[in-house]
């Protein structure tokens, strides 16, 4: 599933060169897109040993990925980061106004 997504994005011309270094290549996609309530521990461990964890996480945050483990974070964890960034951006905007 993750591989399909990567290939689809590459076909759209989106630079995904960092994916060439993904530690999850060849891993079971179900680990990264688990059923509701299933453990994400193994996927997150694979991510923590991944050379492109930061790139992956940033991509998932910026593109608002709704599903799966990306950069060792779940959608819920990524949503929290997006919210914090939005608040920080709003505060910067208010200060500069
Ligand atoms: S951080 Fe995780 S999901 Fe992202 S490329 Fe690396 S192993 Fe794959």
Image (spheres, rainbow, N blue to C red):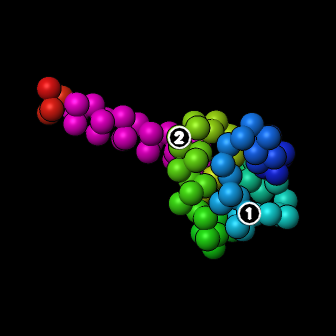
Magenta stretch, residue numbers: 72-93
| Residue 38 seen in render | yes
3D distance between C-alphas at marks 1 and 2? 19 Å
Which residue: 72% across, 41% down? Answer: 13
Q: What residue appears at the point 15 percent right and 32 percent down from the top-left corner?
A: 96
- Measured as percent of width and height from the top left, residue 10 is found at 76, 45
Q: Residues within 10 Å of mark 1 (few under 14, many from 20)?
A: few
Instruction: Please name the residue shown 63% across and 39% down the image.
Output: 65
> Compared to 4, does 32 lie above or below?
below
Q: Which residue is mark 1?
A: 20
Depth check: give the residue in front, 32 or 41.
32
Q: Main secondary structure of the magenta part?
A: helix
Residue 27 placement (x, y as % from top left): 82, 63
- Reading the image, the residue beneath label 2 is 62
Of callouts 1 and 2, the N-terminal one? 1
The C terminus, quarter of image: top left
Query: Which residue is depicted at the point 58% across and 62% down?
Result: 53
The reply to whether dot 1 and dot 2 touch (C-beta < 8 Å) is no
Q: Say how many tags the image has.
A: 2
Camera-side residue of 63 and 74: 63
Residue 37 percent coordinates (x, y): 70, 46
Please state which of the two labelled residues, at mark 1 or mark 2, is closer to the viewer.
1
Q: Which mark is residue 31?
A: none
**79 and 63: which is toward the camera:** 63
**50 shown above or below 91:** below
Counting other residues with Cα less than 10 Å from the Cα at mark 2, is it few (<14), some (14-19), or many (20 or more)?
A: few
Secondary-structure class at tag 1: helix
- Secondary structure beneath dot 2 equals helix
Respond yes or no on whether mark 1 lies under 8 Å from ligand 1: no
The percent position of residue 66, horizontal first and vertical second, equals: 64, 36
């Amino acid at each position: 599933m993750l591989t399909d997504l990567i290939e689809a994005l590459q076909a759209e011309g989106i630079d995904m060169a960092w994916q060439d270094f993904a530690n999850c290549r060849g891993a079971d996609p179900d680990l990264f897109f688990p059923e509701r309530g299933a453990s994400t521990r193994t996927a997150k461990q694979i991510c923590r040993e991944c050379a492109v964890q930061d790139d992956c996480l940033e991509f998932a945050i910026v593109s608002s990925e709704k599903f799966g483990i990306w950069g060792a974070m779940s959608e819920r964890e990524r949503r929290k980061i997006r919210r914090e960034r939005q608040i920080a951006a709003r505060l910067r905007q208010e200060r500069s106004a």
